[in-house]
Image: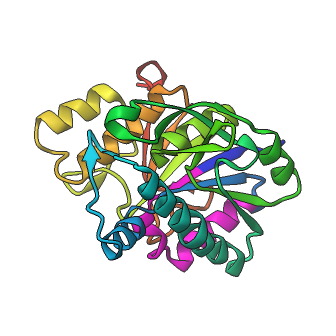
Amino acid sequence: MNKILTVKCGGSIIHELSDTFFESLKELKDLGYCLVFVHGGGPDINEMLSKEGIEPVFINGLRKTTKEVLGIAELILSGKTNRCLVEKLESHGIPAIGLNGSDCGIFQAKLIDETALGAVGQITNVHTEVLGALLEKGVTPVLTPISSTGLGKKANVNADMAAGAAAKALNSEMCLFVTDVKGVLIEREIQKRLTKTETDSYINDGKIYGGMIPKVNTALAVLDQGVRDVMIVSGKERFFQNGEFIGTKFVKEERVMN
């Protein structure tokens, strides 16, 4: 199979993806890359919860998922956010199919702490056969992070971690995190490569701050899952042009060249 890129889109950036972003995707496909998308949908889920009079609860960054919240999360992720991303890909000439991560047991998970978190899961296995068959046909899978816990039961999984698990299982060349920024800026310059040591140092110095801190910590956490490389790129402009990625790549310490 051709080289695979796993692409994670946050729910907030999906509605802001630019035409130039899709031009980068098409250029990558023309170079023989296969694409697998995993997406979140936090803003849309929160909006629906608000309409239902349910206050979102987060514990250590994870959404407490009661049975009612799980139903709403799945409804929004698979019925709205997923449809939106698939339509955007199709409208830019990229054949795509939307799937719940629980379909065919693609994402299998165990519950982390049912008493405290409800139906929040951690992925234990990724069945890649269905994904591989679609990629062989030139179709881009677009996955929600809703996962199967067996016997028809489901769990809500953090989309970042789901993307990392998919990237590892598929032996992806890279896991791309699509955000609203080009990458990590230090003194107005994009850092092309960062290790954990360098990233931690910039955080301690106050050069990485605010909303960028959770972005880089997520990237490093996924790198720790065993993914080859992880990159933060922009969904608002080209992130790949003339054979080069534009953004910040996070790499393991021993792979940095002097």
User: Given the current orientation, which residue lies at the most extreme left position?
Assistant: 205
- 73 in relation to 109, above or below: below
Q: Which of 71 and 108 is in front in this view?
A: 71
Return the x and y of residue 229 as percentages of the image width and height: 52, 36
Residue 198 covered by magenta stretch: no
Q: In the rendered image, which quarter contains the C terminus?
A: top left
Residue at the image position 53 percent from the left and 38 percent from the top = 164
Residue 216, above or below 22: above
Q: Taking 241 as reference, is 102 left or right? A: right
Where, by quadrant of the figure, is residue 97 drawn? Answer: bottom right
Where residue 189 sits: x, y (%)? Answer: 27, 54
Quadrant for the N terminus in the image: top right
Number of numbered discs overlaid on the protein picture: 0
Residue at left 69%, top 54%?
35
Residue 126 in the image: above or below residue 95: above
For this view, does 6 lie left or right of residue 250? Answer: right
Which residue does the image show at 39% across and 30% down from the upper left? 113
Q: Nearer the viewer, residue 162 or 203?
A: 162
Residue 63: % across, % down: 35, 48
Residue 163 location (% of width, % of height): 55, 44
In the image, is residue 198 above or below residue 93?
above
- Magenta span of residues: 7-29
Residue drawn at x 51%, y 67% as measured from the top left: 76
**Left or right: 16 as drawn, with respect to 190:** right
| Protein image colouring | rainbow
> Please, what is the dominant secondary structure of the magenta stretch?
helix
